[in-house]
Amino acid sequence: MIIKNQVSKDILRILILTLITIFAWVAFDVYRVLSKDIQSEVLKEQTEPLNPELDLKIIEELNSRESPNEQDFARIPKDRPLQFNQPAQEKIASQSGAIQE
């Protein structure tokens, strides 16, 4: 009877300490979420106003670029096959121990 009473007291102590730990954990998480500054996650660059004027020099540079024509595509050799990285062939050992491919 004394051993059963001692065990139940130990279990009760563990349960109470666990319950206090859970409440403290939840309280600290709620405090952390409520005290967190939402604005700190937004980068300063994202909040700067945009320049409404277009840079015409950059636009002209883009327009002056040459696109490839038929002659450029004709210089590409067509008889050379495309090479892809093939996985290595798996080697299989026979009953005698000789490697077969």
Image (cartoon, rainbow, N blue to C red):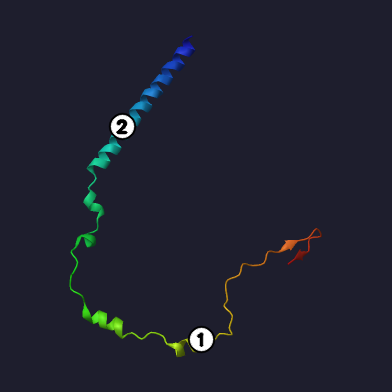
**Residue at left offset 45%, top offset 88%:** 70
Instruction: Kindly identify which residue carries mark 2.
Output: 24
Q: Residues within 10 Å of mark 1 (few under 14, many from 20)?
A: few
User: From what the image shows, is residue 93 above or below residue 56?
Assistant: above
Residue type indicated by callout 1: Ile
Q: Are marks 2 and 1 in contact (CB under 8 Å)?
A: no
Determine the secondary structure under disc 2.
Answer: helix
Q: How many marks?
A: 2
Q: Where does the image place residue 73, in percent across and percent down from the top left?
A: 47, 86
Query: Does 44 appear above or below 1?
Result: below
* Of the image marks 2 and 1, the number of the one nearer the N terminus: 2
- Few, some or many C-alpha atoms within 10 Å of disc 2 (few <14, some 14-19, many ≥20)? few
Residue linked to disc 1:
76
> In terms of secondary structure, where does tag 1 sit?
loop
Q: Which quadrant holds the C terminus?
A: bottom right
In this view, the mark in front (2 or 1): 1
Does residue 12 appear left or right of residue 90 in this picture?
A: left
x, y percentage for residue 25?
32, 34
Please tell me in which quadrant of the rendered image residue 6 appears.
top left
Residue, x 23% and y 52% (percent of image)?
Answer: 40
Amino acid carrying label 2: it is: Ala
